[in-house]
Image (tube, rainbow, N blue to C red):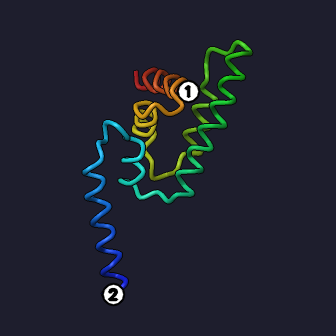
Amino acid sequence: MSIEHRIEKLEYYCSLMLDMISPEKKPFYALVIRYGLTKKEVEDTLRLCEQLTEQYKQQKEEGFVIFTSLFTEFASALHPNLPLAETIDALQKQQLFVPLMNEFQRLLHTLNK
C-alpha cells in the first residue's frame, strides 16, 4: 500500500472520528480537526489563552472592567484558520478559559450591535 493511499485512509478515518465525537461535548477539539491545526498550533492557541487568562485576572484585580486590549491581542494572535467567534464559542462551550471567553463573548456581542 502506497504512502499516499495510507494518508488518504487516515484522513478518511479522521473525518469519521470527527463525526463520531460529539461536537457538543468537545467543540474546540472538533474545530481543531475541522480546520486541520497541528499539535503545535493547538498548543500555541492554548498557551495564548493561558497567558491572556493570567492578564485578565491581573486586570480584574486592578479594577479593570473593559478587556478590549486582551480581545484584540487574542484576535490578532489566533491561528488564521480559526474563525474568531466560532473559536471563542467553542472554547467557552468546552469549559476552557470560561471567564475570559465570557468576556470575549460580551465584547463580540457589543461589536456586532
Res 83 → quadrant: top left
Is 104 left or right of 56, judged from the image as shown? left
Residue 79 coordinates in the image, percent (x, y): 52, 50
Q: For mark 2, does the 10 Å Cα neighbourhood hold few (<14), some (14 to 19), or many (20 or more) residues? A: few
Residue type, label 1: Leu
Res 56 → quadrant: top right
Number of the front mark, 1 or 2: 2
User: Which of the marked residues, 1 or 2, is nearer the chain's N terminus?
Assistant: 2
The single residue placed furthest to the bottom in the displayed view is 2
Q: Considering only vertical position in the picture, is 61 above or below 29?
A: above
Q: Secondary structure at mark 2?
A: loop
Residue 81 coordinates in the image, percent (x, y): 45, 53
Residue type, label 2: Ser
User: Residue at 33% across / 70% down in the picture?
Assistant: 10
Residue 12 coordinates in the image, percent (x, y): 27, 66
Is 39 left or right of 26, judged from the image as shown? right
Residue beneath label 1, please?
100
Viewer-proximal residue, 39 or 86?
Answer: 39
- Residue 22, numbered circle: none
User: Residue at 46% across / 20% down in the picture?
Assistant: 110
The single residue placed furthest to the top in the displayed view is 63
The C terminus lies in quadrant = top left
User: Residue at 57% across / 43% down in the picture?
Assistant: 46
- Marks 1/2: CA–CA distance: 46 Å
Q: For mark 1, does the 10 Å Cα neighbourhood hold few (<14), some (14 to 19), or many (20 or more) residues? A: many
- Residue 2, numbered circle: 2
Viewer-proximal residue, 77 or 51?
Answer: 51
Q: Are marks 1 and 2 in contact (CB under 8 Å)?
A: no
Q: Secondary structure at mark 1?
A: helix
Is 71 left or right of 81, judged from the image as shown? right
